[in-house]
Image: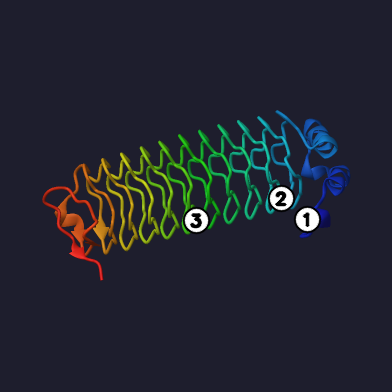
């Protein structure tokens, strides 16, 4: 089984050999045939590749549209510009994978493990990412419009300029994530953890921030106008230049040592100390 755990990245040619030499990588005939097709053409549309091992494989622009990759071992794959629209990646292992600019639109990715993967510029609009592990993942410029990220973990994710418009993110953990310039307009984030996030210039316009924790967060220049901030906690939160006009439910008792400046726009009755 030495080939199965080899550390060196495998090219398509070596992948074909691995399939023939290691039937445990793809125990069923259809899976073997699918991997052979992927090897020969760089595509395997709607193939059933559940439970296969593709660890370290390198394919530019692979087409796995609607493929079933459920519980596949895809750690450290190099698949930039890949096509995974409507694919089934539930519980797949994609730690440290290179998936830059790949298309996961409408994909089923519940409980996928993408820790420390590179998804810069990827498209995940409408994807199901409930319970996903995106800790330490690079998400710069990625799109999650309308995606379902309920209870997903994005601790320390680098999501600068990412778009989460109208995404469902109830109970998500984004602690210490870099959300600078990210767009959460209309997103649902009730009871999510945004402690210590860097969200300068981010937009939460019209977002549901009910019960969200924003302790020690940097929201300099952020747009929170029209957001629902019922039971939101602002403890040691930086808000210079932020726009909180029209926010709903913001309780002064839950604003503890938060600060702003002359450019901060606040609802009537809310006062912040000046930032030092």
Distance from disc 1 to disc 3, alpha carbons, whole Å, reads 25 Å
Specify few, some or many for label 3: CA neighbours under 10 Å numbering under 14, 14-19, or 20 or more: many
Q: Nearer the viewer, residue 155 or 23?
A: 155
Residue at x-position 69% and y-position 37%: 50
- N-term-proximal mark, 1 vs 3: 1
Residue 267: x and y in percent read: 17, 48
Where's the N terminus, which quadrant? bottom right
Q: Which residue is mark 1?
A: 9
Image coordinates of residue 174 in percent, x first then y, are 42, 53
Q: Residue at x 68, y 40 (%)?
A: 82
State which quadrant residue 37 falls in.
Answer: top right
- Left-right relation of 82 to 156: right
Marks 3/2: CA–CA distance: 19 Å
Tag on residue 225?
none
From the viewer's perspective, tell me whether residue 191 is left or right of residue 46.
Answer: left
Q: What residue is disc 3 on?
A: 157
Residue underneath mark 2: 78
């Amino acid at each position: 089984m030495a080939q199965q755990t080899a550390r060196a990245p495998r090219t398509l040619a070596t992948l074909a050999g691995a399939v023939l030499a290691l039937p445990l990588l793809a125990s069923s005939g259809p899976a073997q045939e699918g991997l052979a097709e992927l090897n020969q053409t760089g595509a395997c549309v709607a193939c059933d590749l559940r439970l296969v091992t593709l660890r370290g494989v390198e394919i530019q622009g692979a087409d796995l549209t609607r493929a079933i990759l459920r519980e596949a071992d895809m750690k450290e794959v190099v698949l930039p510009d890949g096509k995974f629209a409507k694919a089934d990646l539930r519980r797949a292992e994609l730690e440290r994978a290179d998936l830059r600019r790949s298309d996961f639109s409408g994909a089923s990715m519940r409980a996928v493990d993408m820790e420390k993967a590179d998804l810069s510029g990827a498209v995940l609009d409408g994807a199901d990412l409930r319970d996903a592990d995106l800790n330490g993942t690079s998400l710069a410029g990625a799109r999650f419009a309308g995606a379902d990220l309920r209870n997903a973990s994005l601790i320390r994710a680098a999501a600068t300029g990412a778009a989460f418009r109208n995404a469902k993110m109830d109970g998500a953990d984004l602690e210490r994530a870099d959300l600078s310039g990210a767009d959460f307009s209309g997103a649902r984030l009730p009871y999510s953890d945004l402690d210590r996030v860097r969200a300068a210039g981010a937009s939460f316009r019209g977002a549901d921030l009910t019960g969200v924790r924003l302790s020690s967060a940097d929201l300099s220049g952020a747009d929170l106008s029209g957001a629902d901030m019922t039971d939101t906690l602002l403890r040691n939160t930086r808000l210079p230049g932020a726009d909180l006009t029209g926010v709903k439910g913001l309780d002064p008792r839950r604003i503890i040592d938060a600060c702003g400046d002359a450019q901060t726009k606040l609802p009537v009755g809310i006062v912040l100390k000046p930032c030092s």
